[in-house]
Amino acid sequence: MTTALFWFRKDLRLKDNLAWTKACESHRIHPVFILEPELISNSGPYRRQQFFSNVSALAAEIKSIGGELSIIQGPARDVLARYIRENNIDCIYFNADTTPFSRQRDEQLAKDISVPINTFWSGLVHPPETVLTQKGEISKVFTPFYKKWVTLPAPPSVEDSQPIFVDAQQNTWNETQDLIPSTSNQGYKAAINRLEKFLKVVDDYHESRNFPSKEGTSFLSSDLHFGTIGPREILHRLSSNREGHRQFIRQLAWRDWYSHLLFANQDIPTKAANPSYDNISWRDNPEEFENWTKGQTGYPIIDAGMRQLSATGWMHNRVRMITASFLVKHLLVDWRKGERYFRKMLIDGDVAQNCGNWQWVAGTGFDAAPYFRVFNPMLQSKKFDPTGIYIQRWVPELESLSNAEIHAPWEHDQATLQKYNLMLGETYPFPIVNHADARERAIATYKEARG
Ligand SMILES: Cc1cc2nc3c(=O)[nH]c(=O)nc-3n(C[C@H](O)[C@H](O)[C@H](O)COP(=O)(O)OP(=O)(O)OC[C@H]3O[C@@H](n4cnc5c(N)ncnc54)[C@H](O)[C@@H]3O)c2cc1C
């Protein structure tokens, strides 16, 4: 029997993992994870912690079935060829990815490595280039993409496999133990627990998903990013004739769409998808950017979201939209700066999803929000946090304000504010910009860029 090196990347699981199943069908397996410097340097503290926990959980799972995950230090282009030689590897298996970093690295490896490389797709419901218009292109508009995506046959479940591992003693590189701190509370089991919990409330998803104070969403984005669970396994647990389920399935389609778009347009992280917006005269005021990151803009819903992000590495989707829009439109900071900050801080920070969403919010992307759409933070706040619970949790300076008062503290007279020990400019900032003026300025700036 020949020996396959199985390279775990963004698929840190053994179930519903096509490349893993294929490798196990006909080879002895040598499971490897490569700790590449880019993976560490591009992650903030929350994603790094999650990443270590997931790799450590995978190592424990492999150990429980008689194998040993080798964790070696990258970059892959430097270590893989030597590792293959020294461990008598006959072929490589892995799941492909859509990011520019991954694709460039894999193309180079294919040139440098002498053994056959077998790649599959396991991180998306449908692989890139399989959901196409009649002209054979990916739709630049979401709805037609979705209509096609949803009618394609659901990909079959991937069989569980019974791996035969190489004897761990044969591994000449034993770096494994010290590289990853051992915390195994994440991984596949934790992802399944999150899925099971969510399936109890998925019927209400279409109604509760927009309210940041409710636990109305799945919290599976980081699992999907690291591949501790596959989207197809999730899809197989849903039913397309129930509204909550249908709305949730639609979100999985957005995820596929942004990945397919990135696969087809590798400059999405750096260039406006709509070139007329490459010439926006951004203000890029560093002080205002810093106030935004710290949750000190004077707009309670923005500050709540940004403080939740700093404290936990997560932010609710609706609040991501409001805070991102505020940075780009109200403050006229280049969307790429916000995108980089979010990507570093978010536990689910993901090139395809983050860039796709930032470009959508900024109005520069495919099928994006129109340039004149400028979210009104007070209206968004009243609509999606009507009782102010979310704001109270993250902006405790405002916790004694009533439901009606909390969304725009500056609108209340001095006596009301004093009653709550609130001194604007001292205990909580005045708004960093006036909404109406900022809105007008944003629309004028975008119009100018359009020419
Ligand atoms: C400015 C901005 C930046 C974002 N950055 C990221 C990011 O870096 N990584 C990331 O995974 N998501 C990102 N999103 C999308 C979305 O906010 C998160 O996927 C979602 O909040 C994660 O929570 P959940 O798993 O509970 O979502 P659920 O509502 O339970 O959705 C289920 C899954 O569908 C996918 N999904 C949901 N909404 C979107 C969406 N708008 N676009 C693409 N996929 C979606 C996610 O994989 C999510 O886990 C961003 C959204 C915005 C507006």
Image (spheres, helix red, strand yellow):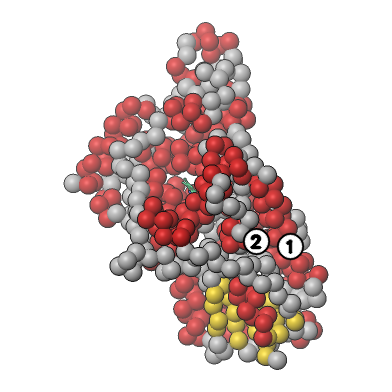
Q: Nearer the viewer, mark 1 or mark 2?
A: 2
Quadrant in which residue 385 is drawn: top right
**Relative to residue 63, is residue 90 drawn left or right?**
left
State the CA–CA distance, disc 1 to disc 2.
10 Å
Q: Is residue 265 above or below residue 201?
A: below
Q: Does the CB distance between marks 1 and 2 fall below 8 Å?
A: yes
The tag earlier along the polypeptide, 1 or 2, is 1
Q: Label 2 sits on what residue type?
A: Thr
Q: Nearer the viewer, residue 55 or 410?
A: 55
Q: Residue at x 55, y 83 (%)?
A: 117
Q: Is residue 200 visible?
A: yes
Kindly identify which numbered label has been placed on residue 57: 1
Q: Nearer the viewer, residue 325 or 246?
A: 246
Q: Residue at x 55, y 87 (%)?
A: 116
Q: Nearer the viewer, residue 247 or 240?
A: 240
**Relative to residue 346, is residue 450 drawn left or right?**
left
Residue furthest toward the left? 451
* Image quadrant occupied by the N terminus: bottom right
Kindly identify which numbered label has been placed on residue 228: 2
Residue 252: percent from left, percent from top = 52, 54
